[in-house]
Image (spheres, grey):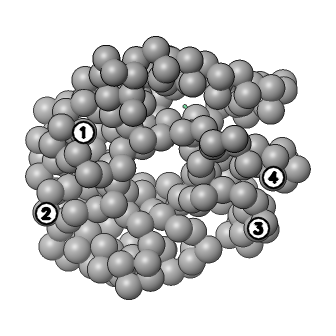
Amino acid sequence: MEKARIILALDSLVDKEFLREASTYVHGIKIGLPLTLRAGVDGVKELVKGIDADEVIIDFKLADIGSIMIKIASELDFADSFISHSFMGKLGALDELKDFLDTKEKKLYLVGAMSHPGWNDSLNSYTASVIKEVDPYGIVAPATRGDIISKFKKEFPDKVIISPGLGTQGAKYGEAICHGSSFEIIGRSVFLSSSPLKALNEIIEKQREEVLHCKGTKTGE
Ligand code: BMP
């Protein structure tokens, strides 16, 4: 069966057996700083070893000068992709990180806009200008505000958009895909459940139904 358009957000320790099975249903997993601080880099490496994810994304939201971001990424060479903020700009920061990741054949995602209520959408024209200059592989845009996803998709039709903010943060499963995202990022709605695999399967079903429903009406392809 085709994998669900989901990236599991791992922000706390999870059971390896659960992850092994869950990874067969979803596109990718996203490793947060809280998990890495708890498990250590070797612990995270061990956790993801042998799982079936197509993409392992490190989400430390890098936000520093280039050489420091490169140092951090170098310590995590088991990952396929890295998420960085975009507000630092290109010269001396994101240009260096992007070049480094390109040489390692790894992907860079830049945060276009965040999902929480306090994000100021007037920053988005600036983040979009940085995204244009840096030309990352993908963009993080909020499931909580579908119109913002649509704007980024319109401006960057070839970029992979990944979107957090579903379930616990309020957005409906499938809604981000319907607005143009490639993958929905989901964490607590799975991991805080007493039965994470059951929760994940229910979410996958809800996402499929919503995307089926919006196909042809928005950008649910
Ligand atoms: P949850 O489904 O538990 O709300 O997790 C969302 C995940 O997406 C977290 O790992 C968080 O760091 C990340 N995230 C977010 O919630 N909002 C953003 O704007 C950007 C993120 O990366």
Residue receiving disc 2: 133
The answer for how far apart the CA atoms under marks 4 and 3 are is 9 Å
Q: Nearer the viewer, residue 219 or 187?
A: 219
Crowding near the residue tagged with mark 2, few <14, some 14–19, many ≥20 C-alpha atoms within 10 Å: some
Residue receiving disc 1: 153
Crowding near the residue tagged with mark 4, few <14, some 14–19, many ≥20 C-alpha atoms within 10 Å: some
Q: Nearer the viewer, residue 191 or 218?
A: 218
- Identify whether 122 is placed above or below 81: above
**Disc 4 residue type (three-letter):** Arg
Residue receiving disc 3: 49
Frontmost of labels 2 and 4 is: 4
The answer for how far apart the CA atoms under marks 2 and 4 are is 38 Å
How far across and how far down the image is residue 73, in percent? 48, 74
**Disc 1 residue type (three-letter):** Lys
Mark 3 Cβ and ligand 1 under 8 Å apart: no
- Is there a contact, CB below 8 Å, between mark 3 and mark 1? no
The answer for how far apart the CA atoms under marks 1 and 4 are is 32 Å
Crowding near the residue tagged with mark 1, few <14, some 14–19, many ≥20 C-alpha atoms within 10 Å: many
**Disc 2 residue type (three-letter):** Glu
How far across and how far down the image is residue 86, in percent? 26, 55
The numbered mark, 1 or 4, whose residue comes first in the sequence reads: 4
The numbered mark, 2 or 1, whose residue comes first in the sequence reads: 2
